[in-house]
Amino acid sequence: MDWSAARIFGMKNLTIAMRYPSNWIIWAFMPILWFAPFILMATAIAGPSSTHFTELSGFSDYIQFCVIGWFVYMFLDNSIWAIGNNFRWEQFSGTLEPLFSTPVPRISILLGAAFSDTALCIIQSSVLLSISMVMFGVTYSLTAILPTIIILTVMVIALYGFSFMVAGLILVFKDPSVLTELVSNATYVVSPVQYPIQTLPSGVRFLAYLIPTTIGIITVREIAITGVFDLVTFVQVLLGLAVLGLLFWALGIASFRYAEKWTKSRGHMGGF
Amino acid sequence: MWERDGWRAELRAANALAIKQWQVELSYPLSILWFIVMPFLWFIPMLLAGTAVTGSAESSALEGLIGSGDWISYIAIGSAYSGLAISLIWGSGFTLRREQNVGTLETLMTTPMSKNTLVWGSTIHNIQHGGLGVVLQLGASVLLFGVNLNLWGVFPALGVIALSIIGMQGLVLIVVCTVILAKQGWMILEMLSSTLFLVAPMSYPIAVLPIYLQYVSVASPLTWSVEAFRGFLMEGLAFSGVINAIIALIILDVIFIILGVVLFRRTERYVRGKGALSQF
């Protein structure tokens, strides 16, 4: 692992991102246009409040429920679209093959990309949360800030493994849009962003818990809305995320290495 | 002997472009999987969210707004139509950019076909693509989710689609102008399409929108297309809003197609004049 190379790669990505600020600033506002239809739909079919929703989820305010869900979900979305697609962007720029011919461990390049994209995602999701709180008039407990930061940190590290897997798939399949859309939408469907996890069929619920953001969303939501912090549950959540992180890192690195070897042996590295 | 000009020749050219696009799409197996799975991945979150807030298949709140409490059919039909609209706006909107990416834009621009035909060819492909998606999604919705469709409304609904394509094509041409000017126009298109879909009654009646957004909504051809399409499929020939929807759709079709064609001609001439057609 070459931390210096990871830092330089990350700084390179951030420098390019700062040259095109609208590219990433817009993603702080865009999700509002995506989750607003769910809020409007809920208002249309359930009215201003829903006892069924309260009984199912334990929360009374659907908008408050959705906004915090999207805040956490942005990190999963980022890990798929930004981190996972990093090598595709290098390929478009014509720098993928030179990059892969350097004596730098691939994990360093992947982590460098992950660090820069995470930095941007933190800004985007914070702006999204702030604007949504003002626009929809929702509030969250201030005591949730520190536990949220800790959970998000562990969750993001776990998600890096997931991104490595997506990066490997894209090296093989090339066309990022279709595959990324499929992965992104499939994970979105099973994530409790717009609905409580109890709404999912039990078999699908098990799959949902395999994605680190599910645990992140449920825990952050609970703490942020109720303001109640339980140390035992918190530690269990961190352990769960750590186990998922180890699993995804192992799978992610293995599948990326396999994808790289497969692509190189077919001479597809720079191909479209 | 084939003629090189006239509407028949343009139609042949558009058809050839549509076939070409199908051949390219079908050579990526993932595209086929995407085509089958994606409509469900868009609809299922709405279904789950709706189930979470209502707890049943009927909604008294929706019945108070539109006269029917069958929210699942309401959302399923709106969602199916949105698949077609997305296919048209994104698929056709990026026609010229796609040709530019593969290096064939200038070659196509030097052929004796009309420049509009390039976009129409893509539209024909996307109507077929989106249309198949509508059939697939509605069929599965009926079989799996208990959606109710009024069979007497199927042909009128198809007529609404045919009518709405004119206005949608106008929108598509405006999108094409944005893309050829901005090059990396996906961000602008994402904002534009997300806003269009936000104000369109895909999964909620426009009555729940803030008043200023309702004005934007009634000025969009998408709104009247969805209302009429769903109205016929839910109520059949007894759909009460048919006259308003059809008149509004015709008026907006004329406005948007004229606007789209004029803007496209001017933009294409401007970009060619700057020698920027093949620039990235």
Image: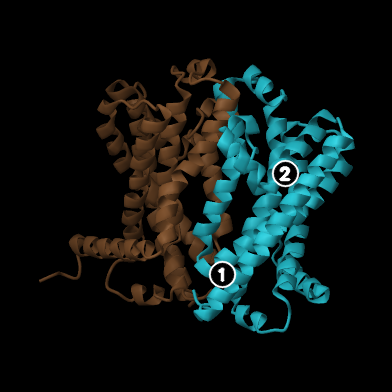
Chain colours: A cyan, B brown
Mark 2 belongs to which amino acid? Answer: Phe
Q: Are marks 1 and 2 in contact (CB under 8 Å)?
A: no
What residue is rendered at 44% in x and 18% in y?
A: B68
Give the letter of the chain under mark 1. A
Q: Name the quadrant of the N terminus of chain A.
A: bottom right
Q: Position of residue A255 (x, y in %)?
A: 61, 65
Mark 1 belongs to which amino acid? Answer: Leu
What residue is rendered at 74% in x and 43% in y?
A: A216
What residue is rendered at 50% in x and 42% in y?
A: B42
Question: What whole-number distance in Å separates the C-alpha atoms at marks 1 and 2?
Answer: 29 Å
Q: Position of residue B22 (x, y in %)?
A: 33, 61
Front position among marks 1 and 2: 1
- Vertical position of residue A130 compared to residue B126: above or below: above
Mark 1 nearby-residue class (10 Å; few <14, some 14–19, many ≥20): many
Relative to residue A271, is residue B224 drawn left or right? Answer: left
Residue position marked by numbered label 2 in the rendering: A71
What residue is rendered at 60% in x and 44% in y?
A: A188
Mark 2 nearby-residue class (10 Å; few <14, some 14–19, many ≥20): many
Circle nearer the N terminus (1, 2): 2
- Choose between A146 and A214: the one closer to the eye: A214
Residue position marked by numbered label 1 in the rendering: A171
Could you say whether the residue bearing mark 1 is in a helix, strand or loop?
Answer: helix
- Judge whether residue B221 can be spotted in this image: no
Could you say whether the residue bearing mark 2 is in a helix, strand or loop?
Answer: helix
Give the letter of the chain under mark 2. A
- Judge whether residue A183 can be spotted in this image: yes
Q: Position of residue B272 (x, y in %)?
A: 44, 73
Relative to residue A243, is residue A162 drawn left or right? Answer: left
